[in-house]
Image (spheres, rainbow, N blue to C red):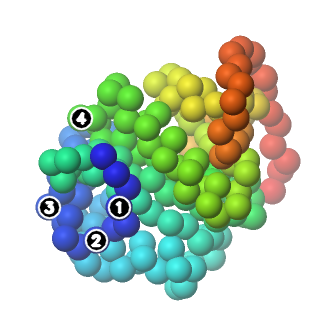
Amino acid sequence: MEFVSPTSVLESAFLRFYKDFELSDPINSLTYEPARVAFKKYVNRLKDEAQGINHSEGKVRCNHYWLVNDYKEIMAVLRIRHHIDTPYLSLEGGHIGLDVSPRFRNQGIARKALSLAKQKLHRLDIDKVLITADESNFAARKAIEASGGEFECIFESRSLYKPIARYWLATQTTQTTQTTQTTQVICFAESA
């Protein structure tokens, strides 16, 4: 498996990825709805975001990658944000966005994707990144912790109206391994 940049060549594979979300995770499928409507335009928007052009307010430069297996199926989508200098990203969004296709979940894909993401982020000279997950998404939290994520706290999301877990993840691999014991900590966000 490998990460590839968005391409129109993988339209049918991406639409299958979208359909998996639409059937199993409809709320997250909304993120990918524009691809169903106008795929080439969607791919061009992702390429623009990677180049840092045509940003809407509150958006930052963001590389998009699709994790593709040997059968040319898209297993996951990764978003790597070059910085988190917006109120939303510095609190909730983080540097990394990762969505694993529902049919590929519970197969170690998230952990593999995070390992590859750390390499890409390190090449961007970002040594430590923020990654978040729903507090109740134990599979995502386990993948983050297995990838070296250090738990910071739980806070109530203002945009999603649910508890979110915050982690910090070093992008450079160290020789020592450590066991992380998660303790429930509550963060309080400043009022906007």
Disc 4 versus disc 1: distance between alpha carbons? 20 Å
Q: Is residue 45 above or below residue 16?
A: below
| SS type, badge 3 | helix
Question: Which amino acid type corresponds to the residue marked 3 in the rendered image?
Answer: Ser
Dots 2, 1 in contact, CB < 8 A: yes
Which numbered disc, 4 or 2, marks the residue that appears first in the sequence? Answer: 2
Q: Counting residues from the N terminus, which is met first, the one under dot 3 or under dot 1? A: 1
Mark 4 or mark 1, whichever is nearer to me: 1
- Residue receiving disc 4: 103
The answer to whether residue 44 is visible is yes
Residue at 63% of width from left, 76% of height from top?
Answer: 57
Q: At x 19% / y 66%, what residue is drawn?
A: 11
Q: Residues within 10 Å of mark 3 (few under 14, many from 20)?
A: some
Residue 90 image point, x, y percent: 73, 53
Q: Is residue 115 above or below residue 137?
A: below
Determine whether label 3 and label 2 are within 8 Å by CB. no
Q: Spatial distance from mark 2 to mark 1, Cα to Cα?
A: 8 Å
CA–CA distance between discs 4 and 2? 22 Å
Could you tell me how far apart the alpha carbons at marks 3 and 4 are, in whole angstroms? 16 Å
Return the residue at label 2: 7
**Label 4 SS:** helix
From the viewer's perspective, tell me whether residue 169 is left or right of residue 33: right
The disc at residue 12 is 3
Amino acid under disc 4: Arg
Mark 4: give few (<14), some (14-19) or many (20+) Cα within 10 Å. Answer: few
